[in-house]
Amino acid sequence: MGNPRGVRRDFEKLEERRLLAASLLRQGVAQAEVARQVGVHRQSVSRWAQQLAHGGRKALKKAGRAGRKPRLQTADLRRIERRLQRGPQVLGYQTSLWTAGRVAHLIEEECGVRYDPSQAWRILRKLGWSCQRPVGRALERDEDNIQEWKEKRWVEIKKKPKKKGEPSSSPTKAD
């Protein structure tokens, strides 16, 4: 059955559970009772008992990691991050915006590993980069003029809250 989506397995706790089962089995407790005490299916205890018989307690130690090994090593990730910091214009792009597609291209060029842009985005998150959209502002924008408008003109034209004691226009309000 496995874990719910997004929930990581705690390998230390799983190993603890297997070793507890091993000690109970060595004490002569029945497999069905071990399964009840440990909180697992009886078939799991049966499999652990076989592993214990063939390889001892060492056979019940944690496996290490789950899933496929990453195709990029730590050194590759450091190299990619250095290239990311230099900016996409160094690679010949017109704008200074990193897109997932551009990052995927960078990874393929730098490490020879081809990734889909969605996976490239996961690698960016792993490196601590976040999604940031550039602020679309006109080059002719006059910040001083905008600030003056906000402080003077906006104060004059914005709606003001009604004063207390004024009658409500709501038909549901009881008098």
Image (tube, helix red, strand yellow):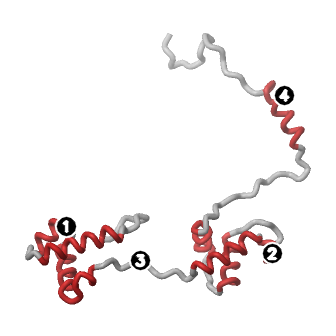
Identify which residue, 92 or 22, lies in the foreground: 22
The numbered mark at residue 65 is: 3
Q: Which one is in front in this view, the residue at disc 4 or the one at disc 2?
A: 2
Distance of mark 3 from mark 4, alpha carbons?
62 Å
Which residue bears the numbered disc 2?
A: 90
Distance of mark 2 from mark 1, alpha carbons?
58 Å
From the top left corner, tell me how far across and down residue 50 is, in percent: 19, 85
What amino acid type is highlighted by mark number 1?
Val
Mark 2 or mark 3: whose residue is earlier in sequence: 3
What amino acid type is highlighted by mark number 4?
Lys
Mark 3 or mark 4: whose residue is earlier in sequence: 3
The numbered mark at residue 50 is: none
Mark 4 or mark 2: whose residue is earlier in sequence: 2
The numbered mark at residue 152 is: 4
Distance of mark 2 from mark 3, alpha carbons?
37 Å
Local secondary structure at mark 1: helix
What amino acid type is highlighted by mark number 3?
Arg
